[in-house]
Structures are given as C-alpha cells and as structure tokens.
Amino acid sequence: MRSIGLPELLVILGIAVLLFGGRKIPEVAKGLGEGIRNFKTALKGDEKPDEAEKKQA
C-alpha cells in the first residue's frame, strides 16, 4: 500500500473547499482534531486533568 502524495492531498483539499467553502474549513478541521484526540484518550483510558482534580477534591 502506498502513501498519499502531494497530488492526492491537493485533490482532497480542493474537494473539501468545494464542499465546505473556505470559511468552514478551519471549523471542520478543529472538530476533526478534537474527535481524534477524544478517540485516542478513550483508547488509552486516560482521564482529563480537570476530571482527575474533581475526583480528588
């Protein structure tokens, strides 16, 4: 399986701009990043620092 190269990334970016518009792209990327971060922490079983502090108090 080969990796995604520059031409493929440009095509994906172009399609994203057409679908969401230039102003929505940062919001979509932020939501995607938060979703990935939540998924990773759920797999690890780590708690958020603020949740750990609430349990100690």
Image: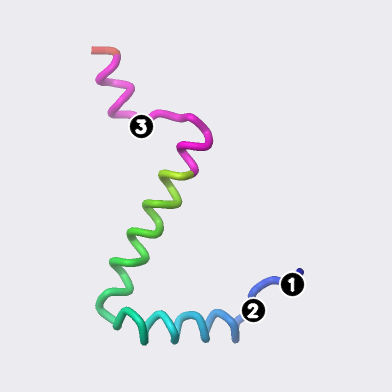
Q: Residue furthest right?
A: 1
Q: Which residue does the numbered mark 3 point to in the structure image?
A: 48
Please name whichever residue, 57 or 14, is drawn nearer the observer in this view of the structure.
14
Q: Position of residue 22 (x, y in %)?
A: 29, 82
Q: Nearer the viewer, mark 2 or mark 1?
A: 1
On screen, residue 27 versus residue 9, left or right, reads left
Please name whichever residue, 19 or 50, is drawn nearer the observer in this view of the structure.
19
* Disc 1: CA contacts within 10 A as few (<14), some (14-19) or many (>=20): few
Query: Looking at the image, do the residues carrying marks 2 and 1 touch, with CB atoms under 8 Å apart?
Result: yes
Residue displayed at 46% across by 38% down:
41
Q: Position of residue 40 (x, y in %)?
A: 49, 43
Please name whichever residue, 49 or 44, is drawn nearer the observer in this view of the structure.
44
Establish if 37 lies above or below 51. below
Start-end of magenta stretch: 40-55
Magenta portion: prevailing SS class: helix
* Disc 3: CA contacts within 10 A as few (<14), some (14-19) or many (>=20): few
Q: Which residue does the numbered mark 1 point to in the structure image?
A: 2
Residue type indicated by callout 1: Arg
Q: Position of residue 16 (x, y in %)?
A: 40, 80
Q: Which residue does the numbered mark 2 point to in the structure image?
A: 5
Residue displayed at 28% across by 29% down:
50
Residue type indicated by callout 3: Lys
